Amino acid sequence: MAKKKTQNSKFKTQKLKSKIQKSKPYALLSVSDKSGLDKFAKGLKELGFEIVSSGGTADFLTKAKIKVTKVQKLTKYPHMLDGRVKTLHPVIHGAILADQTNPKHLKELAKYKINPFRIVVCNLYPFEKVISKADFTHEEAIENIDIGGPCMVRAAAKNHKSVAIIVDPADYSLVLDELKNNQGKIPPGMRESLAKKAFEYTRYYDSVIVKYLYSRGVAEETLPAQVELQLEKIQDLRYGENPHQKAALYREVKIGSWAMGSQVTRAKQLGGKELSFNNYVDMDAAWSAANAFADPTIAIIKHTNPCGLASDESLVEAYKKAYAGDPVSAFGGIVAANRRIDEETAIEIAKLFVEVVIAPGYTPKALMVLKGKNNLRIMEMGEGSINKPFTGLDIKRISGGLLLQEPDLAQLGLGEIKVVTTKEPTLEQMEDLFFAWNVAKYVKSNTIVIANNKQAIGIGAGQMSRIEAAGLAIQRSRTAVKGAVLASDAFFPFPDVVEFAGKHGISAIIQPGGSKKDQDSIDKANELGIAMVFTGRRHFRH
């Protein structure tokens, strides 16, 4: 008897399944982006599909002379609450979520006279487009948060065993080809691939909303509990740091109309060969360093460290001073300017072999000069980028995770420094101390920077001890350091650097202070007649 019941159940299930398979296939179309939709809908009609649609999509298809069944005809409810409620109904979601191989689901579909969907086509309200407008309101942004759409997309993606979900108009032709070649069916592999794309789509959509709300200050956390990075692949690179490493350039997706400062990933290439992985790393370091100064400034970077950096009233003089700071290391480096490059400056740059030049812009004659160097990569940041540092989070990769921090954008004010020695720095020395301190921020720790007349004349970068960094800075100086100033990115644990500086004629020192032995350094500076100021802030750069 039990065996007979089982056979009857299997027979009924098979009958229901056969009935669904033989019945007219249904497709649900509800989209914001209607590009290519009419052609796709006509293709579905030719393959025997019944099209169900709602709102603007139904109107669009009707105008295209494509017969549709409106959602409200199935649900027996009109669109409600200014269109906020359209597809949120058991008849619609039952048709999407039904496992068309499950006997219980098939019985319930038959009981409630629900025709299951084989295809769902849905893309969402243009939230990102709305918040990219200059004059959008917060109310308009919130109203353009789609609710029914993501529910349909996720439901269909979950049930990709039975339903194909399409969120991208670029997939229309591929789906039609599969339907034509497979007797009106879409292969399981393609359904799974489409589902993956759909989940990526809704994940991105939600992350845009979250990022928008953070941008308004709705959430006060600078470093939230969870972080979603939206990156788009721009190009494959020839290789990574070394030829045996594969690499690609990804750009953080800009959300909305607000800016995060100047971004080298959005620089335009005006000439030269393809940029490499290392070019991008050095170019970012060069642009950040040059763009941190208010006066016309040139930074020359080698392996992410400045080998020359100078400011002046004219850009060409700033370049000459930066180059003179270390002409040997400047060969093959990256040159960044925080002003539009003119012909005179371009002529000077063209005398040297450099990999990349990056600037807000170029005069036509300057561009002609630089393009005369066949392989020189010429990058344009745009005039609006001047003195606008990148304000996004600073991210460093470690194995198994990421370290995130606020960017080091701290500016030193006159009211923040403390003169700790008997001798006070002169106005000229103070200007150079501020300049050297700002340079140190862009040099790998431990670092010592020696400067004179807004020119870095000696840089000791990335040393394991501070006294070694000081020795390297003196050694690399191409001009006499007597009367110059010295900046240290962190405090002095011992007075040895002060003593060393005194032997070479350094006139003033700027450092964070904060060591248990600060007084030893202060006493030594007083003994040697060196002015010293404390900033109360360090600038480690690892």
Image: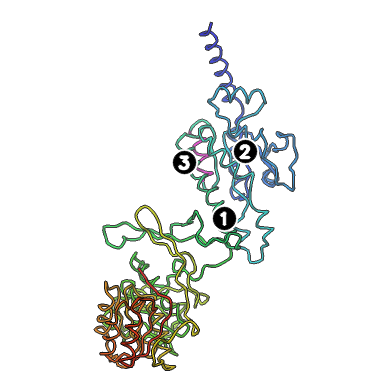
Q: Nearer the viewer, mark 2 or mark 1?
A: 1
Residue annotated with mark 2: 28
Does any portion of residue 320 appear in the rendered image? Answer: no
- Residue 277 image position (x, y, % from top left): 34, 64
Residue, x 34% and y 54% (percent of image)? 399
Query: Magenta: predominant secondary structure element?
Result: helix
What crowding class fits label 3: few (fewer than 14 Cα within 10 Å), some (14-19), or many (20 or more)? Answer: some
Seen in the picture, residue 312 relative to 88 is either above or below; the reply is: below
Where does the magenta region start and end?
Answer: 171-181
First in sequence: mark 1 or mark 3? 3
Disc 1 and disc 3 in contact, CB within 8 angstroms: no
Residue 300 is drawn in which quadrant? bottom left
Q: Nearer the viewer, mark 1 or mark 3?
A: 1
182 vs 336, left or right, is right
Does any portion of residue 136 appear in the rendered image? Answer: yes
Disc 3 marks which amino acid? Ser
Please say whether residue 176 is one of the residues in the magenta stretch: yes
23 vs 350, left or right, is right
Q: Gap between marks 1 and 3, in whole Å?
A: 26 Å
Please say whether residue 386 is one of the residues in the magenta stretch: no
First in sequence: mark 3 or mark 2? 2
Which secondary structure, mark 3? helix
Residue annotated with mark 3: 193
Residue annotated with mark 1: 210
